[in-house]
Image: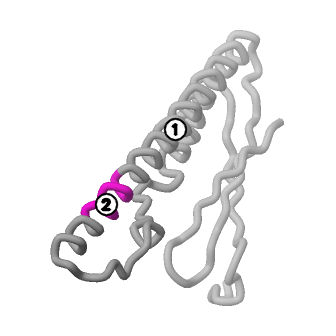
Amino acid sequence: MFLFALAASLSGCGPQFTTEYEIVPPASDMGRMCANNCLLVKDQCEQNCFAQQQQCQQMSALQDNLEYLTYVAGRQAADKPIKRDRGSFNSYRCGDNECLARCTQNYNVCHTNCGGRVIPHTYCTAFCDELPPQ
């Protein structure tokens, strides 16, 4: 039995939750082989997510640098002082963990299709005192 954690934070104020998945393996040998293939696909999916995130950050850094250089050239052409520094053009526009969440969701479906079970356990991790009484 394995536990996989997936942070499912709500944006803004209010309680934040995390869901951990209890993974119950399939009973049959064929089901366990199938589930192992699901793990391989999930690992590849996560590697792709990390590569996409890294590429996005690199492209964003290049875009930020271009915007800074354009700003400097414009200020110099207008004979105006340069008031902003390179750091003020730091606008990483890369997504959060949506890609990883899709990998986990796909894995959960795959594992279930192989005969295993995925049991979600969701609990509050922050601002829990703001929850209404049950």
> Residue 17, located in which quarter of the rendered image?
bottom right
Q: Is 11 above or below relative to 112?
A: below
Looking at marks 2 and 1 on the same chain, the residue that comes earlier in the sequence is marked by 1
- Residue at left offset 64%, top offset 89%: 130
Q: Looking at the figure, which quarter contains the C terminus?
A: bottom right
> Is residue 124 rendered to the left or right of residue 81?
right
> Is residue 10 rendered to the left or right of residue 73?
right
Q: Which residues are magenta?
A: 63-70
Amino acid type, callout 2: Leu
Residue 64 lies in magenta, yes or no?
A: yes
Residue position marked by numbered label 1 in the rendering: 49
- Residue at left offset 72%, top offset 17%: 32
Q: CA distance from mark 2 to mark 1?
A: 30 Å
Packing grade of label 1 (10 A; few <14, some 14-19, many >=20) is some
Q: Which residue in the rendered view is the most extreme toward the top? A: 30
Nearest the eye: 47 or 84 = 84
Check contact, mark 2 vs mark 1: CB within 8 A. no
Q: Looking at the figure, which quarter contains the N terminus?
A: top right
> Residue 41, located in which quarter of the rendered image?
top right
- Residue at left offset 69%, top offset 46%: 119
Q: Secondary structure at mark 1?
A: helix
Q: Main secondary structure of the magenta part?
A: helix
Task: List x then y, in percent, for residue 129.
Answer: 71, 88
Task: List x then y, in percent, for residue 6.
Answer: 65, 52
